[in-house]
Image: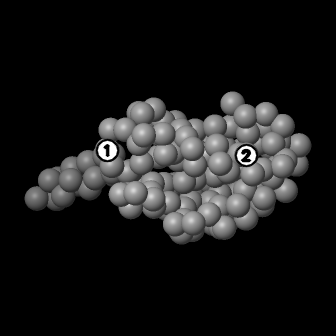
Amino acid sequence: MSKLLILIVFCLIIFMEVPVKTTAAQSQLKECITHSHCIKEIWVVNDSRKAFDEAIKIIEETPRTTIIEKNNYYLHAEAKTRWMRYIDDLEIMLVDNNIEIRSESRVGISDNGVNKNRVNNIGQKMTLIVDRS
């Protein structure tokens, strides 16, 4: 019985996506697996702290967006789509003196460009971005 319990716990640990708390120097946002409903960009900035704070302010003022987690180097927000009210995950993180931003739909195969538009709208409002890739 105990071996079965250990096997179950091991499988849960391996197959569940558990967020890991790390520092910006140790980690980065995960890559998009399906690009039809996910976008990830790296923004090169002159002053990463000011740019990060500017992006946070823009996200806080974005309609239908709720901040779930926020600290000195990371923000996770849930953004509801305008039409169908689907929830998308929006993340932004300081990584190696640059900013990574990622937006991904939780459901569906395609997002009709909603996540790309969300990231583009935030980027267009930013004044401290030097380069976007």
Q: Secondary structure at mark 1?
A: loop
- How many marks the image carries: the answer is 2
Residue drawn at (73%, 64%) of the image: 57
Residue 87, visible in the rendered structure: no
Q: In the image, is residue 37 above or below residue 4?
A: above
Tell me which numbered mark, 1 or 2, is placed earlier along the sequence: 1
Please provide percent x and percent y for residue 100.
Answer: 66, 43
Q: Tell me the amino acid under the disc marked 1.
A: Gly
Q: 21 or 130: nearer the eye?
A: 130
Task: List the residue tagged with mark 1.
Answer: 108
Q: Is residue 98 left or right of residue 39?
A: right
Q: Secondary structure at mark 2?
A: helix
Please name which of the two marks, 1 or 2, marks the residue nearer to the observer: 2
Residue drawn at (49%, 62%) of the image: 78
Residue 121, visible in the rendered structure: yes
Residue drawn at (84%, 47%) of the image: 128
Q: Is residue 123 left or right of residue 29?
A: right
Image quadrant of residue 18? bottom left
Please provide percent x and percent y for residue 74.
Answer: 65, 57
Q: Tell me the amino acid under the disc marked 2.
A: Gln
Q: 17 or 53: nearer the eye?
A: 53
Task: List the residue tagged with mark 2.
Answer: 124
